Amino acid sequence: MDIFEKLLKHMGPIGEHSDRAHGYFAFPKLEGEIGPRMTFRGNEKIVWSLNNYLGLANHPEVRATDAKAAAEYGLAAPMGARMMSGNTNFHEKLEKELSDFMGKEDTTLLNYGYQGIMSAIDAICSRRDVIVYDAECHASIIDGLRLHQGHRYVFKHNDIEDCEKQLKRAEELIKANGGTGGILVITEGVFGMAGDQGKLKEIAALKEKYEFRFLVDDAHGFGTMGKTGAGTGEEQGVQDKIDLLFNTFAKSGASIGAFMSGDKAIINYLRYNMRSQIFAKSVPLPLVIGHLKRVELMRKNPELKNKLWENVNKLQQGLRDRGFNIGRTNSPVTPIYLQGDIPEATAMCLDLRENYNIFCSIVVYPVIPKGQIIYRLIPTAAHNDEDIELTLKAFSETKEKLDKKVYEVAEIPMV
């Protein structure tokens, strides 16, 4: 059989809808300046789909720094992998600034968050080691687990009792294998779909009973959580109990790239053993210099985070007051849980975009169970009260239509 033939027979659970969804529900094109209002298919929309939490994407100091760095160094510099020919004083300065911000001894930059955390898991764990992880960890972590040749035990989402059960299983397995392996526990600071914080404090407390190291993916917590914005570990008072902190610039930083912070000796080990960094080009200087400016603004301008949370509270309270189920979120991530099948969900989304000028992400099967719809809203510091009020009105009216079966259609609408 031609290997491509089987691919064309089944495009996958999302790809099977590509003929109707492409360019609208999937791969839409938002145009104009990044912000709470952008252009979609020629019309202005209020946008709730961008992880631009602090509104830094178009901050004048950020834009000026990015432009100056690009003009001075170009996007090619430095050439080569970091280990071979791609290191600079700017890279090392950024790592030092991030270590200080995170309250950790050292930090290593990562070209991309997705491949970075996969590679870190691969570098840390051998086939004798056991990984214990939360069931709702991000896809990048799951793909990292696929690289792991040893055992892995999953615990029910944020279920500390089950986490402890899996730790016991891990300890028993290691003992049976002669005690030559170790345990790595992985969870997230803020879960990006539901918006709930990981049980970092409770997991850290288990260190008193079990021997393990603790890795936290805090991509959505960096810049948004904690008194200084250092993340969910700071928010919960256990930053010092987290052995490895993974963060990305793709959310609050409004850029690209990531970093890992922890004890100096372990970070140095990762520098010399993460294949995704050893065999990939170094982060370009304009990005590194731009990251330095972003970190400076995060640390020196608490009003950015304060404004974000002002908008978060207004949006979330407004939804609750109108009877919407926004689940267990205790972060800026704002899900709206509704009932309906894929055709209904897409018809409702079409109505929101075309008649109410509200653009937000919709999640349906197979990402979540059949019969459910999740709208995922991301408030930012750049949104204003009018954006929030218009959005609340739009969701109230469209939910009423959903409940009255107005959106019942046989198939996904053509757009």
Image (tube, grey):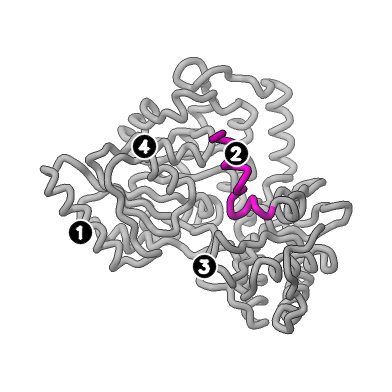
- The amino acid marked with disc number 3 is Asn
Q: Badges 2 and 3: C-beta atoms under 8 Å apart?
A: no
Instruction: Give the mark nearer the N terminus: 2 vs 1.
Output: 2
Number of labels in the image equals: 4
As for residue 297 lying within the magenta part, the answer is: no
State the mark number for residue 168.
Answer: 1
Q: Which of marks 2 and 4 is in front?
A: 2
Residue ID for mark 3? 330
- Distance in Å between CA atoms under marks 3 and 1: 30 Å
Residue extending farthest to the top is 85
Question: Which badge, 4 or 3, is on the more N-terminal residue?
Answer: 4
Identify the secondary structure beneath mark 3. Answer: loop
Q: Which of the 4 image quarters holds residue 364?
A: bottom right
> Is 318 above or below relative to 218?
below
- Residue 122's label in the rendered image is 4
For label 3, the crowd category at 10 Å Cα-Cα, with few meaning under 14, some 14 to 19 and many 20 or more, is: some
- Extreme-front residue of the structure: 1
**Which circle's residue, 2 or 3, is located before the other in the chain?**
2
In percent of width and height, residue 164 lies at: 25, 62
Q: Earlier in the sequence, mark 2 or mark 4?
A: 2
Residue in the picture at 49% in, 34% down: 110
- State the residue position of label 2: 5
Q: Position of residue 294 (x, y in %)?
A: 61, 41
Mark 2 nearby-residue class (10 Å; few <14, some 14–19, many ≥20): few
Where disc 2 sits, the SS reads: helix
The residue under label 1 is which amino acid type? Lys
- Do the numbered discs 4 and 1 sit on residues whose CB atoms are within 8 Å? no
